[in-house]
Image: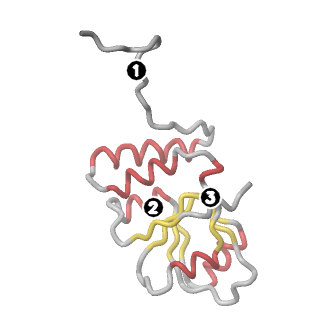
Amino acid sequence: MGIDIEAGGRIKSKARVTSSANPYIRLLCKLYKFLARRTDSKFNKVILKRLNMTRKNKPPLSLQKLAKLMAGKDGKIAVVVGPVTDDKRLYEVPKLSICALRFTETARASIAKAGGECLTFDKLAMRSPLGKGTVLLRGPVKARQ
């Protein structure tokens, strides 16, 4: 009895690899691939998966939504694999530590004005390599066309 394999053989599913030409994204993928392999932290595996996603699957998160989601989580770092945008409707921005792929200029200014800090993923890897003390957030994927 043989195994019935259709022409072309069985398909082995491979993890998606980023097609971005951005050297920063490519270096981050290498860093988090290493951390995902060498640590048994699920956080690093999720970050690597999200870094390799398409641009459409890395939607922006507004500062207002971020402040609402981080209410009552003092001392934790908000991690967004995508851009963080400013929100004119939010008058008082709370003091937040946010790690994101990019920040709009106005969002960065309002976070700094509130006494918060904007982190990059390489700084996050140095500060919290296992993802301890972080809150992983993502923007609304279905809201975009």
The mark nearer the N terminus, 1 or 2, is 1
Q: Which mark is residue 10?
A: 1
Please say if 38 is above or below 6. Answer: below
Q: Where residue 107 sits in the image (x, y, percent)?
A: 67, 73
Q: What is the distance, in whole Å, between disc 1 and disc 2 at their CAs?
A: 41 Å
Which residue occupies the extreme front position in the image? 1
The mark nearer the N terminus, 1 or 3, is 1
Q: Disc 2 marks which residue?
A: 123
Q: What is the distance, in whole Å, between disc 1 and disc 3 at their CAs?
A: 32 Å
Q: Disc 3 marks which residue?
A: 141
Q: Nearer the viewer, mark 1 or mark 2?
A: 1
Q: Are marks 1 and 3 in contact (CB under 8 Å)?
A: no
Q: Nearer the viewer, mark 3 or mark 2?
A: 3
The image quarter containing residue 140 is bottom right
Q: Are marks 3 and 2 in contact (CB under 8 Å)?
A: no
Residue type beneath disc 1: Arg
Q: Secondary structure at mark 1?
A: loop
**The N terminus - image quarter:** top left
Would residue 128 appear left or right of 60 to someone viewing this image?
Answer: left
Q: Secondary structure at mark 2?
A: helix
The mark nearer the N terminus, 3 or 2, is 2
**The C terminus - image quarter:** bottom right
* Residue at the spot 27% in from the left edge and 10% down from the top edge: 2
Q: Where residue 136 sits in the image (x, y, percent)?
A: 46, 66
Residue type beneath disc 2: Lys
Q: Secondary structure at mark 3?
A: loop
Residue type beneath disc 3: Val
Q: Where residue 100 sits in the image (x, y, percent)?
A: 55, 62
